[in-house]
Amino acid sequence: MENLKNILWLCLAGLLLAALPVAAGQIVVSTPSFALVLDAPVGGELRHLYYGTGLSEDDLRQMNVAGTCHHVAYPSYGIGWPGESALRVRHADGVIATRLYVQDVEVRQEPDAVLTLVKLKDCVYPFYVNLCYKAYRDVDVIETWTEFSHSEKTPVTLLQFASSYLPLRRGDVWLSSLYGGWGNEARLLQEPLKPGIRLIKNIDGVRNSHTAHAEVMFSLDGKPQENTGRTIGAALCYTGDYRLKINTDDGDYHHFFAGMDEEGASFRLKKGEIFRTPPLALTYSEEGLGGASRNFHKWGRKHKLANGDKPRKILLNSWEGVYFDINQKDMEQMMADIALMGGELFVMDDGWFGDKHPRDIDNAGLGDWVVNPKKLPDGIAGLLRDAAKHNIGFGIWIEPEMINTRSELYEKHPDWVMKVPGQDFITARGGTQAVLDLTNPQVRDFIFYTVDTLLARYPEIEYIKWDANMPVLNHGSVHLDKDEQSHLSILYHQGFEDVCRRIRRKYPDVTIQACASGGGRVNYGYLPYFDEFWTSDNTDALQRVYIQWGTSYFFPAIAMGAHISAAPNHQTHRSLPLKYRIDVAMSGRLGMEIQPRNMTDEEKNLCREAIAAYKEIRPVVQFGELYRLVSPYDGQGVASLLYASEDKSKAVFYWWKLEQFVNRQLPRVRMAGLDAGKQYRIRELNRIDNIPLAFEGKVLSGSFLMSHGLEIPGEHRMDADKMSDYASRILYLEEVNH
């Protein structure tokens, strides 16, 4: 291109993005409400100018008058940039310095977005970098990633290769992130950014969201607020090891880098080969954390989540009901019970397979995906027959990436496991579990064959619970050559995604859950292949309030598996009232994790009523807009949130008491997300009180509910022998037309 005077820039025009000239070298990547502006002079350096609310043509022309960032948009190591770099490579001659200049800019119209490619080249070597920006037309999200290639005679080693870099002007900037561990996932951490380095990473190898999460939010106007304040959201969409790094040096900017974790994962890029990083999804809102969350939720449902436009069914999972003690009789009994309560799907969990090495406990059978005839004499066909008899769908658990050394598969293919060449390998769960080497095409074919055989032989199966219960403990592959050992993590996840794509192409409508010891695979890198995730193995309702709250910052309720479990809880041993357990589970994708025959008739009736109520509110919960009202982290003794339908005609309000106390004042909860001019009738769901709430059946305006709120009593009005320490409420609001 002769120059960039004629470079097209993307600008909002109604709901469509148009390309219009503004200034020489200026590129504007726009969504309906915000914009990313770059300076891209041909032959010069690509620079970051602006990231924030959408701009007019006049503002764009006068941008330099106001002062802009003007940082290098993708800083490389070695020449002219003294700070942290996004790119570091080593050429065959040993040189590790790179300086990139703009070659060209290409704009492509896609069905749902506009893709802008900024093409860069090293000033000396035939080494090329494409910075890619995908701006969605209907949601406020931009995905950005990087592509590397070269035409050098020998491989170029990629040492550092961030997906994206974003400079953030210093001030009172706060970081919101998620941390935790197994059974305590998605804990919220909010902190001001200070000088130094803040690093968030995960190197589990298989599961990347137990400990840290690859999603963050930046509040630019001080301590994070739910519905006010400029907020940047970022979510790295990747199934593997990652690193988010914020470097605050002595300058005016925080430097944010996101991408794969390169430690131990340098990549030898061959001539003509293209290496593509995972995308970083960016959003911007001036409606605080809640606005950024709603942007992510809408984008997730519309563009990332498998079958994000289809309601999720209410299910019973067998795990906490029977654990490994699978048998035909109990499976049918559980199907019958959940069907009578109004459930729509039954899922048989771990323990159904293995012939020579039966899966009686967790140390045998993985890899041998054949029915244990002693447990299920009529096989899967018999289970499907029973499901049809009770008019309920059927699902099944598998862990296809894993193997036990006590299995026929391992006896036949001991070389299929991840293993450091020439060394013994370490096992995990049950003392026998190992990870299959997905860099090996034979292994990938086997995993596809496992799923394909199940679904082709039994097309009535409508749900798969896909588990993954151990990390990579052996960083090596007997399949890869010595120059590729550092590629293991990257190639494993490329192989994983390849298998998932093959399965999804053939079985697009089967519901598949990403389970990984609970919430180990809660990331948008997984969700194009999965319909939902198991939020946590911890089903304790009180702790789930915190887990689901943290998860909600980035992920919509439709993807969040939330189950009613037994009391005492199997993880915390805490006893919570059934209503409380129901009310927490109904704020996500409702399910059950319990043996129904251990429930009383009264408990079954309450669940039956709750399931009927959830079917009524399901469109609002699974497809509505989330407004978090009172955070459990604020120490006010309660948590509260609300889902509102897009047209504001319906809303579902949740309230949970978190602590036990006497003579303590609870906050009056003001609602959000309603239409101030509409009138709403209030109805309590799952009511157990002897006396209805004072506002039951009453009509109040959206304005009143948002400015004044409702006084929620701290206990239920019940007979003395039924009183409990815990209280919870679900209110259904429906527009009334006078």
Image (spheres, rainbow, N blue to C red):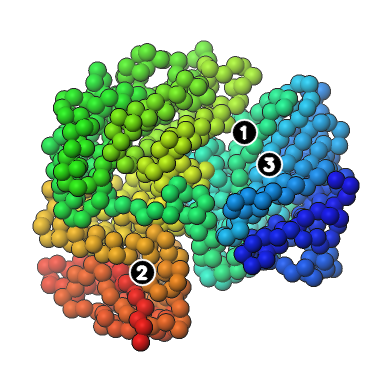
Report the side of 199 relative to 125 (left or right).
left
Label 2 or label 3, whichever comes before in sequence order? 3
Report the side of 586 relative to 1 (left or right).
left
Q: Position of residue 461 (x, y in %)?
A: 29, 38
Q: Secondary structure at mark 3?
A: strand
Quadrant occupied by the N terminus? top right
- Which of label 3 and label 1 is nearer to you? 3
Q: Residues within 10 Å of mark 1 (few under 14, many from 20)?
A: few
Is 17 situated above or below 247?
Answer: below
Report the side of 219 relative to 583 (left or right).
right
Is 218 situated above or below 383?
Answer: below
Cα–Cα span, label 1 and label 2: 45 Å
Circles 3 and 1, Cβ within 8 Å, touching? The answer is no
Cα–Cα span, label 2 and label 3: 41 Å
- Which of label 1 and label 2 is nearer to you? 2
- Residue wearing tag 1: 263
Is 597 situated above or below 219?
Answer: above
Image point 54% across, 41% down: which residue?
238
**Three-letter code for the amino acid on which mark 1 is drawn:** Glu
Residue 146 has which mark? 3
